[in-house]
Image (cartoon, helix red, strand yellow):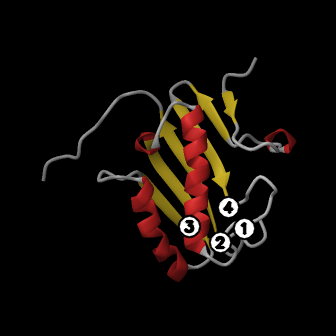
């Protein structure tokens, strides 16, 4: 018996050898996600801002299925191909993360991604539940 619950948001998820997201207790782990639509086509070819926005929209659908929101995301890891282009994603993050506080984040410059034409891949860790935190003073 599995100790986790898989959460999917695409009609082709049953063809994958990984889960788009896995819930274990009060944690939700969202797999590395690229800007691929339900027809497996890249959205926003050549545009890292459009790809980042589409990825976060996909996260939104997964979060909704887990009764969570972007406020529950505590950490992201972002793999990208160009540091110059990556800097353009900050405004998109602000659209979805209404901080501060913002989630912890790690950006990793890579030589390539598995999905052809993907400029960025993002994964996230989510804490489920209603606990709220405030920014430390000072």
Disc on the earlier residue, 2 or 1? 1
Counting from the top left corner in percent of width and height, residue 50 is at: 59, 69
| 4 and 3 marks in contact (CB < 8 Å) | no
Q: Nearer the viewer, mark 4 or mark 3?
A: 4
**Vertical arrangement, residue 104 with respect to residue 67, above or below:** below
Q: Residue, x 47% and y 49% (percent of image)?
A: 75
- Residue pictured at 66% horizontal, 54% vertical: 33
60 relative to 135 in the view: left or right: right
Residue count near mark 4 (Cα–Cα under 10 Å), binned few <14, some 14–19, many ≥20: many
Q: On the rendered image, what quadrant is the N terminus found in?
A: top right
Q: Residue at x 74, y 66 (%)?
A: 42
Q: Nearer the viewer, mark 4 or mark 1?
A: 4
Kindly report the distance in space between the C-alpha atoms of the residues bearing marks 3 and 2: 12 Å
- Mark-to-mark CA distance, 3 and 1: 12 Å
Q: Which mark is residue 35?
A: 4
Closer-to-camera residue (106/21): 21
Q: Earlier in the sequence, mark 4 or mark 3?
A: 4
The image quadrant that residue 30 belongs to is: top right
Residue occupying image coordinates x 64% and y 72%: 110
Q: Earlier in the sequence, mark 3 or mark 1?
A: 3
SS for dot 2: loop
In the image as oriented, which residue stretches furthest toward the bottom? 84
Place of residue 26 in the rendered image (x, y in percent of width and height, measured from the top left): 50, 27
Mark 2 highlights which residue? 119
Q: Which residue is mark 1?
A: 113
Residue annotated with mark 3: 108
């Amino acid at each position: 018996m599995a100790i986790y619950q898989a959460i999917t948001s695409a009609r082709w998820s049953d063809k994958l050898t990984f889960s788009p997201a896995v819930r274990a207790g009060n944690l939700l782990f969202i797999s590395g996600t690229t800007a691929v639509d339900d027809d497996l086509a890249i959205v926003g070819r050549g545009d890292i801002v459009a790809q980042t926005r589409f990825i976060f929209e996909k996260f939104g659908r997964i979060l909704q299925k887990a009764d969570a929101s972007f406020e529950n995301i505590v950490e992201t890891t972002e793999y990208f191909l160009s540091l110059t282009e990556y800097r353009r994603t900050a405004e998109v993050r602000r659209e979805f993360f209404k901080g501060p506080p913002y989630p912890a984040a790690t950006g990793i410059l890579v030589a390539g991604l598995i999905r052809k034409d993907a400029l960025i891949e993002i994964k996230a860790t989510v804490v489920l539940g209603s606990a709220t935190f405030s920014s430390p003073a000072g």
